[in-house]
Image: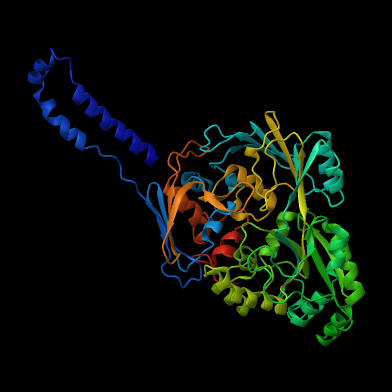
Amino acid sequence: MKRKLSVLLSLVVLASVVLAACGAPATEAPAAATEAPAVATEAPAAATEAPAVAYEGSSVVAPDCEYGGEFKSIEAVDELTVKITLCVPDPAFPSKIAFTSFAIQPSEYLEASGGNGDLLEKPVGTGPYIVDSWVRGDQLVLKKNPNYWGENVGAETLVFKWSTESAQRLLELQSGTVDGIDNVGPDDFATVEGDSNLALFNRPALNIMYIGFNNNPKVDGFDNAANPLANEKVRQAIAMGIDRQRIVENFYPAGSEVASHFTPCAIPNGCVGDEWYAFDATAAKALLTEAGYPDGFETVLNYRDVVRGYLPDPNVVAQDLQAQLKENLNITLNIEVMESGAFLAAADAGQLQGLHMLGWGADYPDQTNFLGYHFGAGASQQFGDKFDDITEALTQGAQLASDSEREPFYTTANNAIRTHVPMIPVAHGGSALAFKASVEGAFASPLGNEEFSVMSNGTDTFVWMQNAEPISLYCADETDGESLRACEQVTQSLLAYETGGTAVEPSLAESYEVSADLTEWTFKLRPGVVFHDGSTLDANDVVTSLAIQWDAANPLHTGNTGAFSYWSGLFGSFLNAPPAQ
């Protein structure tokens, strides 16, 4: 409302000035001047009495940096300038702030939504597509944004559909009912490559599939001292007792590899430090006996039946793990499949018992996105209690600019992760997308953030089929790839990743400046950008969008689950975080 008022008042002033300058016809001017002298003397005063309304910039400032997070303040300096001040240097900050989770929406809409409600299914963004309709369990329909500030050459209508079965996705593509599919099944690569009507696009394996543990002895379902996984030697024994090579060879497609470290080696400092434990069933059994469990024990394996590049067939992998642990360590795994959203929420809250299968794909190519997000001071409770030697090394490494300076700290962190075994890294999975050969502009992104506005099938409608339905479209509070990919068509962040790559480029901010110590980041917003609801982007929208996530006391800090895991995982503790339970 304040923007519209400012414009209206400016027009009134301009009209007054123009009328005063133009006046009446020349022959009538003397009479008018003598008949209405008061008007002539009062006109200048009227012009000065209606100045444009000053921009009221909002801000959020932490009282100090003792609360444990990275952000110190977010300020709307003027209508098109936002300044973010950090407590510590962060050379990866541009890559972080470019991520979908930190997309900008209108402050008025966010406030009206209450932080959830319509916000979960109808985000108001600045992207090339607008949410048209979402029929849960069926399809999500997006329409082209007629007021998009960038280039928009895609189809008028973009339809998201989903199926957990890779065979079903391929059948839909072969029959022509969809234009592209995600995660081609491991056995279907050759089929796609041999079909002249289809095109296969391999995606780099910037991911990790892991077997996680909850090391907290107070996990629901166990007596306080009865959770075997609270014992570090038990976790080490399981790490030695699983043949990861067997899993990759039997259940993963070409281009996959056994993980020597949590982070893919293609990412700087990903594979510094000692490699993971080699498979040794005899040594594993001896260590389990030493830990006090010579006869094994019974626990649970949780996962979601959702295909990922890092986990192409979760059901068969789960069954193989069950067989291996029974054979090698006499550990009985009871398999429990969970709904995807409930599984992710329980993982973030540290509520999963026993073992669980999960994974991660790169959001940007940096250790802060892998080790920092999962094991740093701001990480979720997925693995239970954190380890000081890991968090301290990650905190120090993240503040250094060069890879060589960071290497000793990531070496320490990788070795400490190997010792404490909060999880077992299993595989970096090769994966691929497939499209109709006739689709122009098709590509596979190493970050899994394909842009459909640059693709064309020559018709008004483009249909994409992925592995699962989005959980919600408020991606500040989501972490699953299906939700994020849908959000990426609708909402945008200050910066963005280049199409098909990982380099950071301008988006809603057309430029930025940073202080020499990498703590003050000043963003200049692109002028004239219009949200889907017709309002114009300004600095207050940025402050509100980010402050909702940062400040746990903000009344809009609700979202879908309220976890806001990306914020804490990448930027540390929330401002005004409630006391730990």
- Image position, residue 479 (x, y; %): 65, 56
Numbered label tally: 0
Q: Position of residue 63 (x, y in %)?
A: 41, 68
**x, y percent for residue 409:** 59, 75
Looking at the picture, does residue 515 appear above or below residue 55? below
Would residue 3 be found to the left or right of residue 260 on screen? left
- The answer to whether residue 2 is seen in the rendering is yes
Residue closest to the far top: 27
The colour scheme is rainbow
Q: Dividing the picture into quarters, in which one does residue 423 lie?
A: bottom right
Residue 372 appears in which quarter of the rendering?
bottom right
Residue at the image position 83 percent from the left and 72 percent from the top: 299
Residue ranking furthest to the front:
404
Query: 241 or 407: which is nearer to us?
Result: 407
Q: Quadrant of the N terminus?
A: top left
The answer to whether residue 122 shows anywhere in this view is no
Q: Which residue appears at 71% of the width and 80% of the height?
A: 419
Q: Which quadrant would the C terminus be assigned to in this image?
A: bottom right
Name which residue lies at 20% across and 22% down: 22
Q: Would residue 444 be found to the left or right of residue 544 on screen? A: right
- Image coordinates of residue 343 in percent, x first then y, are 73, 59
- In the displayed structure, would residue 70 be above or below residue 42? below
Q: Residue extending furthest left?
A: 34
Whether 385 is drawn above or below 104: the answer is below
Closest to the observer, 379 or 111: 379
Q: Residue furthest right?
A: 327
Q: Is residue 131 above or below residue 543?
A: above
Q: Nearer the viewer, residue 197 or 387?
A: 197
Q: Nearer the viewer, residue 297 or 279?
A: 279
